[in-house]
Amino acid sequence: MNIVVLAGGNSTERDVSISSGEGVCSALRQKNHKAILVDVYFGKESFGEELFPEVYDVKAEADSMREMSKLVEETGKTRKEFFGPNVLSVCKAADIVFLALHGANGEDGKVQSVFELMGIPYTGTGPLSSGMAMDKGITKMVFEAKGVPTPKGVTLAKGKSETALSAYDMNYPVIVKPCCGGSSVGVCIANDDAEYADALKEAFSYEDEIVVEQFVKGREFSVAVVEGKAYPIIEIAPLQGFYDYKNKYNAGSTIETCPAKITPEQTSQMQTYAELGYKVLNLQAYGRLDFIMDETGAMYCLEANTLPGMTPTSLIPQEAKVLGIDYPELCEKLIEVSLKKYQ
């Protein structure tokens, strides 16, 4: 197949996206697909005479994209368009676009909406469910309404909401996070008034809407759901602190165990909740849901990821490996299940 692996973008998760894209593109090339890596934000003035060449240097393209990252902020000051030169025409020429985007303008349904209107097949779920899952406040409301356990929390609007915890019958510690950010960027734990004030300032520096959530102390887990069926559960145990940006992407900062060492009953319950979360958000093809379980065994779903990390060492590839699915096979499988949307 001729495949565009779309990565980069202009979100806070650009670097993670490039890593995902590089891994996916290399894996698909191993499977003899004519995959190319495309920077959605910068594109190219020319992609050459042969759009999907037999021989292609994935690493060189990824390195070029990383070099362009330093221009994102400056470019954004003078350019309103999100799609770079020739990006849409190249995507239109592909059999499918593998979305390796993370964060705003990629995981939030905007790119998906454009592709729907242009008739471009792509991996993952549709625009509406992408937008719902991206917004942690909306996700929480849907979970609460549909019986998916989730920590108590509230959405606050900058300058328009009461911020005192007493107004929401909450107490310290709390988690403060941007509504639509990803990779735990801007997420803080607050244990007192001073830390809470700092956390609000930090989160509001990213977005005008944030979520304040009752902190649950416990073990952290993640569950991939592919075509509505939960994969083996992976436990994420940070050596220090919680599963923030640093612990997610710095090698050796977390211990990841799959299958997670919990009871069969707990495994079944968490997988059931993951499948329910996937269903009530109307996800398609695949996604990943994150959980925390306290010392009593009570489990809470924290959020859903519609375009989770896809480096070879990311969480979903580790879960798939337990099922005997290697990384290149998984990349192919995600394309296969995504194409069913168009049948």
Image (cartoon, rainbow, N blue to C red):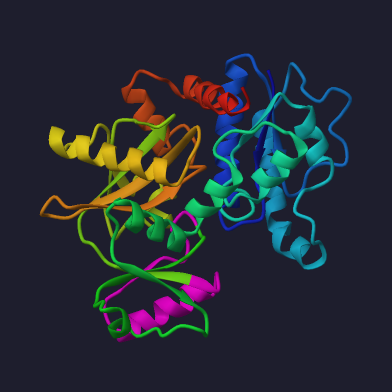
Q: Give the image location of residue 188, x and y in percent.
A: 38, 69
Q: Give the image location of residue 38, x and y in percent.
A: 71, 37
Q: Quadrant of the N terminus?
A: top right
Task: Give the vertical position of 153 relative to 342 (above or below).
Answer: below
193 in magenta: yes
Q: Nearer the viewer, residue 123 or 103?
A: 123
Image-based side of 245 in relation to 332, left or right = left
Q: Quadrant of the C terminus?
A: top right
Q: Give the image location of residue 341, x and y in percent.
A: 58, 29
Number of numbered discs on residues: 0
Task: Give the vertical position of 44 relative to 139 (above or below).
Answer: above
146 in magenta: no
Residue at 66%, 40% (x, y): give it.
Answer: 63
Q: Nearer the viewer, residue 129 or 201?
A: 129
Residue at 10%, 54% (x, y): give it.
Answer: 296
Residue at 77%, 61% (x, y): give it.
Answer: 75
What residue range appears in magenta? 182-209
Image-based side of 142 in relation to 260, left or right = right
- Residue 19 seen: yes
Examine the image and state in which quarter residue 177 appears.
bottom left
Task: Give the vertical position of 36 relative to 167 (above or below).
Answer: above
Examine the image and state in which quarter residue 139 appears.
bottom left
Q: Give the image location of residue 230, x and y in percent.
A: 34, 32
Residue at 66%, 51% (x, y): give it.
Answer: 110
Image-based side of 110 in relation to 211, left or right = right
